[in-house]
């Protein structure tokens, strides 16, 4: 009977665990391309990175945010959507460095909201940081906003209690409250 064969195949397929060895072949979800190797996730492609894209990538590689030591966002990605990584980097005994490459022009509202275990690294090219984008991110002590940024939204870095040094680029024209 064909239905029982299909059912048996699906059960066997669902039990397959991904094997992560060395550099992985790229995975594509929508317009986002991803590679993962030894704790480093690199996201490229085009358009705006969404939380669904990120979830699909983690699922494909069989990993969680906690498995990452470094995340690189760029290679033609133009933006990071609202709530994209909200609360996803929030562990007591773990830390991740998130590099936001020059192609990323916008970081949406609450994009990294309450991500207390991350340190952002911005590159020149970023133009705007949304409201509450890094609210509650207490895992880093210094912050450098590149010269390319012109807008910082309301409470973008509020409750980032560990920051003791801030350098703001020369082209910032608008900073929201707090």
Image: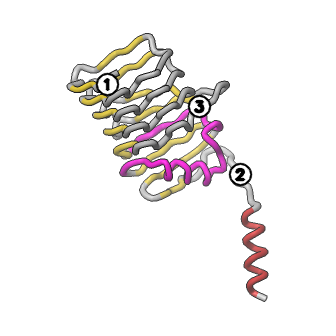
Image coordinates of residue 139 in percent, x first then y, are 54, 22
- Relative to 132, 117 lies left or right: right
Please report the bounds of the magenta region as a residue range: 47-75
Residue drawn at (39%, 35%) of the image: 101
Q: Quadrant of the N terminus?
A: bottom right
Residue 171 x/y as whole percent:
22, 24
Question: Circle 2: is it few (<14), some (14-19), or many (20+) Cα within 10 Å?
Answer: few
Residue 144: quadrant of the picture: top left
At x 75%, y 76%, the residue is: 7
Q: Circle 3 — which element? A: loop
- Quadrant, the C terminus: top left
**Residue occupied by mark 2:** 19
Look at 46% across and 15% down and name the residue there. 163
Q: Is residue 121 magenta?
A: no
Mark 2–mark 1 distance (CA, rounded to whole Å)? 39 Å
List the residue tagged with mark 3: 90
Q: Residue furthest top?
A: 164
Please tell me whether mark 2 sits on a helix, a strand or a loop. loop
- Residue 70 left/right relative to 170: right
Q: Counting other residues with Cα less than 10 Å from the Cα at mark 3, is it few (<14), some (14-19), or many (20 or more)?
A: many
In the picture, the disc for residue 22 is: none
Q: Nearer the viewer, residue 62 or 154?
A: 154
Q: Which residue is mark 1?
A: 146
Say whether residue 51 is magenta. Answer: yes
Q: CA distance from mark 3 to mark 1?
A: 25 Å
Placement of 55 over or under 108, stated as above or below: below
User: Across the whole image, how many numbered discs are drawn on residues?
Assistant: 3
**Which mark is in front, 3 or 1?**
3
Question: Mark 1: which secondary structure?
Answer: loop
As drawn, the residue found furthest toward the front would be 177
Q: 111 or 44, which is in the foreground?
A: 111
Residue 95: image x %, image y %?
59, 27
């Amino acid at each position: 009977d064909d239905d029982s064969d299909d059912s048996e195949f699906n059960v066997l397929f669902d039990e397959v665990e991904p094997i992560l060895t060395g550099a992985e072949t790229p995975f594509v979800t929508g317009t986002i391309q991803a590679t993962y190797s030894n704790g480093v996730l690199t996201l490229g492609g085009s358009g705006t990175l969404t939380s669904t894209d990120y979830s699909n990538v983690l699922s494909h590689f069989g990993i969680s945010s906690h498995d990452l030591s470094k995340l690189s966002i760029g290679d033609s990605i133009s933006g990071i959507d609202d709530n994209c990584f909200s609360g996803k980097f929030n562990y007591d005994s773990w830390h991740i460095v998130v590099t936001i490459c020059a192609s990323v022009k916008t970081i949406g509202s609450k994009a990294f909201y309450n991500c207390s275990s991350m340190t952002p690294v911005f590159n020149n090219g970023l133009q705007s940081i949304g409201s509450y984008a890094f609210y509650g991110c207490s895992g880093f002590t210094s912050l450098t906003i590149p010269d390319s940024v012109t807008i910082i939204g309301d409470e973008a870095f509020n409750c980032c209690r560990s920051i003791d040094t801030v350098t703001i680029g020369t082209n910032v024209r608008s900073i929201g409250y707090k």
